[in-house]
Amino acid sequence: MLNFGLGIGMHAIVSNTSIDQEFRNWVQDDVRSAGTDNAAIFFKTFGEGLYFIPLFAVSDVVYRYCQETGMLREGSSRLGDFASRTTRAYLVGTPTLLVGQSLIGCSRPGETDHESRWSPFSDNNSISGHAFIGATPFLAAASVSKPWWLKASFYTLSFMPALSRINDDAHYLSQCALGWYLSYLSVRAVSKTDGECLPRGLTVFPITETDAFGIGFVFRR
């Protein structure tokens, strides 16, 4: 919770000053091109929750069914772990995403006079959903990968859906950065619950079984 609070603090600084607008102007005037537009079209697809959330949810259920029925051989579950961590990270992060989008009240570029500045409950674009949804599978893949170069590759790719939204002038820097950071925190929380020792403080973790879904809380002193 403290880490997300730090993310909110950085969002406040960037969105309530001229940083967001100046960064937007630089990207649109000096960076955006036909090449970046084509790349944005490709990476924006990974942030489409209508397709990817059901896909990973079904994959997770199938994986857990195969686990319980003994259909998985020893060492053959890395792909299943990836699907499971992605689904559980969505479960952890989505409530915060939905609340934060409206609570902070920022707008998309060019939509309102207050632009990226905080205006509680005035709009629902304060956190980029595409950045959160699109980053999660790549960060989950990094969490189950062992070679450093593979981890680095997945981490690099995790930024691309967020950058596609900045390129398309659909979100400000602060909104995309917080969407990515929320994904990072969600995947980290899920990964830590798979380990032997939970971090100190409050940990929010998803419960995904074949017959039950929910969210649990653990506080470790």
Image: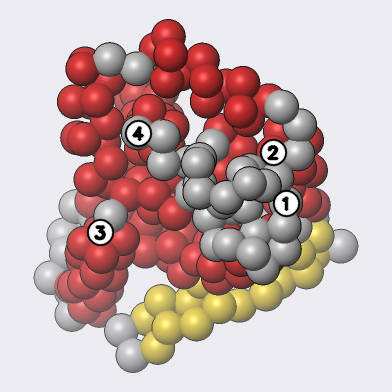
Density class for disc 4 (Cα within 10 Å; few <14, some 14-19, many ≥20) is some
Q: Mark 4 points at which residue?
A: 168
Q: Provide the secondary structure element on which disc 4 rests.
A: loop
Q: Which residue is drawn at 67% across and 47% down?
A: 114
Tag shown at residue 15? 2
Q: Which amino acid does label 4 sit on?
A: Asp
Q: How far apart are marks 2 and 4 (CA)?
A: 18 Å
Q: Sequence order check: which comes first, mark 3 or mark 4?
A: 3
Q: Where is residue 65 in the image (x, y as percent from the top left)?
A: 21, 78
Q: Name the residue under label 1.
A: 118
Q: Distance between the residues labelled 3 and 1?
A: 30 Å
Density class for disc 2 (Cα within 10 Å; few <14, some 14-19, many ≥20) is many
Tag shown at residue 52? 3
Residue 177, visible in the rendered structure: no
**Residue sitting farthest toward the left:** 71
Q: Provide the secondary structure element on which disc 3 rests.
A: helix
Q: How far apart are marks 2 and 1 (CA)?
A: 7 Å
**Contact flag, marks 2 and 3 (Cβ < 8 Å):** no
Q: Distance between the residues labelled 2 and 3?
A: 29 Å
